[in-house]
Image: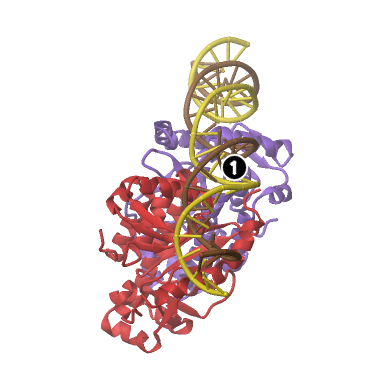
Chain colours: A purple, B red, C yellow, D brown
DNA sequence: CTGCGTCTGTGCGCCAGACAACACACTATA
DNA sequence: TATAGTGTGTTGTCTGGCGCACAGACGCAG
């Protein structure tokens, strides 16, 4: 009915293609090895952070890496510094839809401290970079102590819930054009740059729409001079212009992140 | 672009209409005054529940009651026993979309212990009944003690997250027909009966689709003999039949609720 | 610099669902 | 029993997005 086995095939090629894609990025991306580059880690007191430091390991997050497979128990959590992790649900027929994205403002693996240990959705690296990896049992231990880390993580989780909710609303009511704007803005908020490495095909998979739909929407934005597009490289030229195009969903999510996490994104 | 001021007007009439509607229900619905009728309260140890009991108050939840207004700080949480509370986002233009529903398996007001205190969405009573009301500070106090209540609430929150995620996916990929099936099943799972009191108009508001769309979809289901409805009364006649029609989203959500909350819904 | 694989642009037919307008049916109340 | 209010069924038009097919454009590997 919706989606075809085409999606399936593509999704299997996914990781492979993206890895390949990624090698080009590698050398240009310095390893970000300061835990303070992640908002959650930065927001902790020195004392609190000390409990975690011995177990934090800086790791590469190559494009396409499947961080968590759906319904599979995991034993690591990730605090991105300059990568983006995307939570995606993949349907039986292979069609997919992004549920939320996490960048340097948050953490991947909330199901751990929420008590479920798994989720029906898959998490993949949408934009290559680095993250701090932490063993699950260490995080659980610190979470159970209550206090600042617990509060931070729960507030972040609520922000994430808002993002998911708004995704649902946006999927219901807004056009592909508007959703692309929202997606672009959410993405560049979570990166240090205005450049994204994403083919239209992959964006389409994230948004759960046709590739041609993305081509068309991106074409419009390019004509308006808001972005520049070239074979898997997107550069945002006019951020305020994008914000003028986007639906209210973006602003709602942004405001909640700012409110709950005290403005982790300081760029305009 | 999407929605019209019509929606707005309707939404303002909402509470009023629903209250009126509700008076007819009242006498036929016995006050459910056993805290054990709520899964979360029932799952607690006697000892744990004792901390809450003095502050739990059974309250009426009339159809259409706005439990939480968006972005407004609240000081009560609700444990439904036989009502359904719907979390709805209302857009600037008045169009709306349901994000998740909560019934006797859960609690309304999770933003409290998550640390945000408010959400951008509104919570409305979608099906009249009763709930146990608890003062916010009592819940916060008990939550902060850690232990079983905290774990229960967090697991429930994760189940709710799954519901929201799947709503997003369903909104993206599935037809109105399928979504109506999902909505009906989620609703009757949370009630003791196969009867719902909802006009097609209101269902349309929840799903964020046109009333005519619901008319059409409901007509199909009726022709198939799966439901019977008549001016605001819907009776599910063939539950397995509905389950055969519904998209995978329902099963995913159901499975997660069963897994995380140990099968709070024991009906078939 | 040539060729091939990948990415992007475009055109077409199709359909679900939005929008609009209205007829009819049920129910409560006077 | 008449009437108004509310809920439901129907019809026709229009548009956004899907599926499909293919042409062109880019860029890397040989």
Q: Is residue B256 left or right of residue A256?
A: left
For the C terminus of chain A, the image quarter is: bottom right
Neighbor class of circle 1 (other Cα within 10 Å; few <14, some 14-19, many 20+) is many
Q: Is residue A125 visible?
A: no
Q: Quadrant of residue B223?
A: top left
- The residue lying toward the viewer, choosing from B91 and B113, is B91
| Label 1: chain letter | A
The answer to whether residue B187 is left or right of residue A61 is: left
Question: Taking B43 as reference, is A75 above or below it?
Answer: above
Q: Which residue is mark 1?
A: A176
In this rendering, the answer to whether B130 lies above or below B214 is below
Instruction: Give me the residue at 57% from left, 44% from top.
Output: A29
> Picture quarter containing residue A55?
bottom left
Q: Observer-nearest residue: D19 or A70?
A: D19
Above-or-below relation of B53 to B235: below
Q: Nearer the viewer, residue B37 or A242?
A: B37
Which image quadrant: the N terminus of chain A?
top left
Indicate the position of residue D14 as horizontal and vertical percent values.
65, 36
Q: SS of the residue at dot 1? A: helix
Q: How many marks?
A: 1
Query: Which residue lies at the image location 65% right of the left edge and 59% below the top edge?
Result: B92
Q: Position of residue A164 (x, y in %)?
A: 50, 56
At a point 25% along the width and 58% down the height, the residue shown is B268
Question: In the rendered image, is residue A250 in sight?
Answer: yes
Give percent across and percent down for residue D10.
Answer: 50, 42
Residue A78 x %, y %: 45, 56
| Image quadrant assignment for residue A5 | top left
């Amino acid at each position: 009915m919706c989606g075809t086995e085409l999606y399936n095939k593509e999704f299997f090629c996914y990781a492979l293609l993206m890895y390949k894609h990624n090698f080009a990025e590698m050398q240009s991306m310095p390893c970000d090895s300061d835990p303070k580059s992640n908002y959650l880690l930065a927001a902790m007191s020195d004392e609190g952070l000390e409990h975690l430091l011995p177990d934090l390991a800086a790791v590469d997050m190559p494009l396409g890496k499947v961080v968590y497979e759906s319904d599979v128990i995991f034993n690591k959590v990730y605090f991105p510094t300059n990568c983006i992790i995307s939570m995606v649900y993949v349907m039986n027929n292979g069609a997919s839809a992004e549920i939320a994205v996490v960048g340097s403002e948050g953490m991947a693996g909330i199901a751990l401290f929420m008590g479920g240990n798994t989720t029906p959705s898959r998490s993949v690296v949408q934009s290559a970079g680095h993250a701090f990896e932490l063993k699950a049992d260490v995080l659980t231990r610190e979470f159970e102590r209550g206090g600042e880390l617990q509060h931070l993580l729960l507030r972040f989780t609520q922000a994430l819930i808002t993002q998911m909710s708004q995704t649902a609303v946006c999927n219901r009511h807004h056009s592909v054009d508007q959703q692309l704007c929202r997606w672009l803005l959410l993405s560049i908020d979570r990166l240090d740059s205005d450049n994204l490495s994403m083919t239209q095909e992959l964006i389409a998979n994230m948004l759960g729409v046709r590739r041609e739909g993305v081509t068309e929407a991106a074409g419009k934005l390019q004509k308006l001079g808001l972005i520049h597009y070239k074979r898997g490289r997107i550069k945002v030229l006019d951020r305020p212009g994008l914000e003028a195009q986007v639906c209210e969903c973006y602003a709602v999510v942004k405001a909640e992140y700012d409110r709950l996490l005290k403005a982790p994104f300081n760029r305009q």
